[in-house]
Image: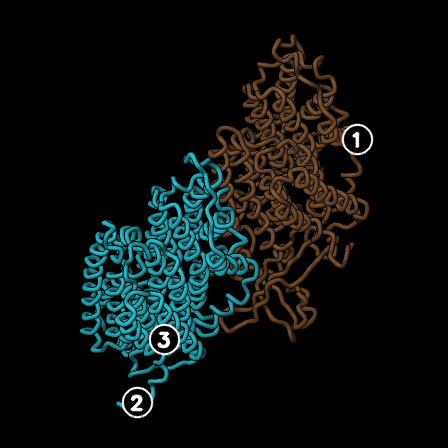
Amino acid sequence: MSEQILKDLHLFYPEITLTITFCAAIITDLIFRRTSIVVSSVVMIGLVITGILVLGQSGVQASIFDNMIAVDPFAYFFKMLIIITAILIVVFSLGSSELNSAGRKLGEYYSLLVALTLGMVLMAGASNLLMMYLALELSSIASYILSGYTREAPDSSEASLKYVIYGALSSGLMLYGISIIYGLTGSLDIYAINQVLAQGNYNTIALLIAGVLAMAGFGYKISAVPFHFWTPDVYEGAPITITAFLSVASKAGGFAMMIRFFKVTFIDSNAVSVPVGVWASLKGFEWYHLVAVIAVLTMTFGNLVAIWQNNLKRLLAYSSIAHAGYMLTGLVVLSNEGLAAIMLYFVVYLFMNLGAFYIVMLIANQTGSEDIEDYKGLGPRAPFITVALAIFLVSLTGLPPTAGFIGKLYLFAALLNHGWIWLAVIGALNSVISLYYYVRIFRNMYLRPSEQQQVTPLNFTMLQKVTVLVMLVPTILLGLYFGPLVQLAQASVKIFGTP
Amino acid sequence: MQLMGIGVLTWLTFLPVLGMVLVLLIPKDQKDAIRWSSLIVTLIQLLLSIGIFMKFDRGMAGINSEAGMQFVEKATWIDIKSIAWFGRIHIDYFVGIDGLSVTMVILTALISAVAILSAWNIEKSVKGYFALFLLLDAGMMGVFVSLDFFLFYIFWEVMLLPMYFLIGIWGGARREYAAIKFFLYTLFGSVLMLLAMIALYFSVNVYIDANGVIYSVTEAMKHGLDGLEKMYTFNMLAMMDPGNYVPGSLLAGAHTSMRYLAYVALFIGFAIKIPCFPFHTWLPDAHVEAPTAISVILAGVLLKMGTYGLLRISFPIFPDAMVHYSWMLALLGVISMVYGALVAMAQTDFKKLIAYSSISHMGVVTLGMASMNTQGITGAVFQMFNHGTITAMLFLIVGVIYDRAHTRGLNEFGGLMNQMPKYSGIMVVAFFAALGLPGLSGFISEAFALLGSFQTFRVLTMIAAVTIVITAGYMLWTLQRVFLGQLPEKWKGLTDMNTREAIMLWPLALIVIFLGIYPSPILDMMNTSLNALAGILDQARHATTMMGMN
């Protein structure tokens, strides 16, 4: 047993590095209390090393620690996504005046950021229900604290408290679901569960209840309706860097875990046709209908409510709920094509969503406001930044020639190719609704004059502009030349042990 | 035809993009440099399109055969090698023109150059205006030359954003409302189009060999399947060949409900652009609020994209559904004609009047092409060209008077004939062309369209003919209100047209007069292609009759 663990250990190096970074961050924080730049550099180095180690896992197909954690292209993809996001978030945090003001000590902030990243990375690979639960809790607890980090802001504490309450409830429900599954099958390893279920003698209703309960945990992580109630408050109250992190990486982790759970546990492995990549679900448990309903509710709700928002952070929170809805439709399809579409969408979403959040942060740094009304007349004051924001918003709407269009194209293509026409139509109509609120932002930036008496141009440093470009260039380039993106997504759908 | 190793259609499409980059590099306060460089870009575009007019082979049909397309350029854009469950993805940059698109390409180049001239007196952020205008120009040109549905869709969508800003920033009092209405309507149409496009993609397959040469299914069978790989395609011409449809796929067969559904989705996308009743409500708002140059582009080129899309995509790809729904298309055309004309009659705003007359005139196009015979379709395409030139003139005329008087109220004017004689001369040409006076281009196309549709839809055409009287009514009444009678005291100071305005209006007027007397130069270009298109529809109609449907 211990020999096996030692043998598997090399595949666990990225997670170990993250753990070491976490400890190192705490220790450096003790030594260099006054200069948080030291801690952030330690964290940055740790994350980059982790990224390099993850790169080394490219193409590996293995299951380690007695099927606790899978190391496969699917996990690899999501780990890379999470780590790239984490690195960008550290860069964002360095430039955030919200965080760096009032002599706040940021040592804990950075070390918790690493803990959060570790939780998400574990979520990407977890293949045992207990491991899934632990990973979920690890990332949740770190995010509770982080979302309340600017505690002198009243909405920040409120956000944190709401987050804890909803989090506790959902993970409780999920735990209950897991226990039912354990009762039905006698195992926590999802591969073993699948084998037991494949024999067919199970109580469908009990399994359905367990599935719905487990869904509560995943739904909470990806903020799907009706488990989304925490999202707007947390996204509005948390520091914007954390909001950005949660909206991309936390969703990525949640999606990775949910996809693995459903795909491995409830797929009839005898009825999978490998050449066309189509799967079939186990008889009597058609969970994909459940996912379809949740997807429709999520995107429609997110978009309809976003229309009424005046705080940009809150608006982007609802928009990120809607995007989770689009991505969920990919899971409904029950084919590799759908999974590839979700993954492709995630890459695109990483750049466009982080870009939008970063610019909102940059503007808030200077104007001190995230209110849409204060964006009036901003266009001429900050031409480069507002054009970049406009491009990110166009991409979020899904208009060509931006990457967002390619993401939607592949999702709709997967849906139509497998006969989910009504779902594709609803998805398409939803992007029309979303246009309305995204356009409000550029309307204020360009069409309306500023209400302030004195209009001064906003100045941004070279580094900030370069950071914007890092996200802007892929957003445009992947819209015009998306071959590599599709190849990457296709190569990453392979989940260990399933055809 | 190539210039510096790059095909002429690529130049036509991407020259404005280069122009946009150039404009963005010029400092903000060099307003004249920005104007002149935009004008020069569009003039080069116009010269290129004249070159195309000269070189265009009138005997080649095109439509559904790649060999019949001219100035074709094809290059691999996206190529993803096949993996087990995903299949090969191959998207070409594929452009080319035939008799159907060549007139639209020429029209686009012409109207763009004229519109740049008419925007000369814009003073509010000149740089942004011309940069967006050139991007819009590129999008329009791209739509008319694309032969790959994916490319077509990208260009179609690229135009939305510049148009939104051009109306929204430089427009009139209710510009925000008009701009967002335009944006939402068009996007609603285009997402439906997107879904239809994806459904077509998964229904049509072709074969590709190791060198990237593409074979249709019939060709591949002849050639033998060795070394060929099957793949889905966005190629419009492949979508027109019934032999390429995958048996059992979403849109395979003929007269299936899925095909009808896809046709309707495409139709809504195009009908919003035309705009065809009942999807027209964005147009009066957009026209009234848009600055003159944008109204000119909107009426002159953008509306044509709707009818062009129907002719280029819906007709040859869904001939069966087209036959099935042709009565509906004709009905909507007639309603647009009569309704547009009646509403136009009730307007007191000059620009709104022309906007509604535009809906009415586009109804002629819709009715003409619903007839599905050569005469009707020729009339429709010719009317697209004529409406482009005539309505552009009308909007320019409104612009000229609005620049001076800052009002568009029809009842506020009178007796301008003596005050502005040169201007009135042009105005008379445009008005009579719009009401379809014989000897001017509008007459010929309307006559063709109605003659064609009379063969297919007698009663509807008879109703439609009434519109000619109503149109004459409101046009003459407007003429009378604005130009005849007593000149109000306050307009005594109005100056006549200046040279710039004369330069932008006279070429259009000459084209209108010339084509009214001798329409062959344009008709010859499209004849062969439209015959082929009518042939495709005819075949579908026969097949339908044989099946006992319809």
- Horizontal side of residue A30 vs B196, given as left or right: left
In the depicted view, which residue is nearer to us: B535 or A188?
A: A188
Alpha carbon separation for disc pair 2 and 1 = 89 Å
**Relative depth, front residue between A289 and A174:** A174
Chain shown brown: that is B
Element on which disc 3 rests: helix
Tell which subunit mark 3 falls on: A
Mark nearer the viewer, 2 or 3 = 2
> Would you name the residue on which mark 2 appears?
A4
Across and down, in percent, residue B3 comes to 77, 55
Find chain A in the image and tell me its colour: cyan
Q: CA distance from mark 2 to mark 3?
A: 28 Å
Amino acid type of the residue tagged 3 in the rendering: Ser
Q: Which quadrant of the figure contains the C terminus of chain B?
A: top right
- Decide if residue A263 is in sight here: no
Same chain assignment for discs 2 and 1: no
In the visual, does B70 lie left or right of A463?
A: right
Which residue is the site of mark 1? B514
Label 3: which residue? A269
Image quadrant containing the N terminus of chain B:
bottom right
Mark 2 vs 1: CB contact within 8 A: no
